[in-house]
Amino acid sequence: MAEELAEKLGAALSCSRPVVDAGWLPRTRQVGKSGLKVKPKLYLMLGISGAPEHLEGMKDAELIIAVNTDKKAPIFNVAHYGATNDLFEVAEAMLELL
């Protein structure tokens, strides 16, 4: 679902370390202290909690939108816009609109 959403948005798909550790995406897609440093116009974060290591890799993003079910997730301290919803529901709704 994430790959399809990224494709429809014309975006690159990246991830956090837990996604790499789970084997869902390769380390070459990891953003953070031990991964990529990115500076996109829009950084849409689905399910990212906001660990300091990840934030270091995307701190220069122009616009940050975060979706996480944990309303106390640290990512909401840096996001310009945030939603406390299930990432799969949000991704599915976005795909329906695109």
Image: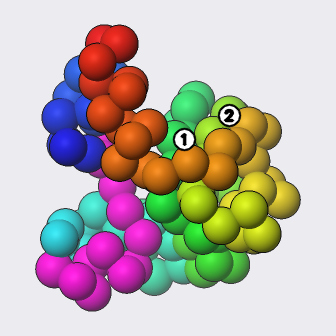
Q: Which residues are magenta?
A: 12-23
Q: Which residue is mark 1?
A: 43
Q: Which residue is mark 2?
A: 63
Q: Residues within 10 Å of mark 2 (few under 14, many from 20)?
A: some
Tell me if residue 46 is in the magenta stretch. Answer: no
Most distant residue in the right direction? 77
Give above or below for 81 relative to 75: above
Asked whether the residues under the numbered discs 2 and 1 touch, taking CB atoms below 8 Å apart as contact, a structural biologist would say yes
Most distant residue in the top direction? 98
Q: Name the disc covering residue 70, or none.
A: none
> How far across and how far down the image is residue 46, in percent?
47, 52
The three-letter code of the residue at mark 2 reads Leu
> How far across and how far down the image is residue 10, in percent?
29, 23
> What residue appears at the point 54 percent right and 78 percent down from the top-left corner?
33
Mark 1 lies on a secondary structure that is: strand
Q: Residues within 10 Å of mark 1 (few under 14, many from 20)?
A: many
The three-letter code of the residue at mark 1 reads Tyr
> How far across and how far down the image is residue 69, in percent?
59, 60
Give above or below for 17 relative to 76: below
Tell me if residue 15 is in the magenta stretch. Answer: yes
> What residue appears at the point 70 percent right and 43 percent down from the top-left corner?
82
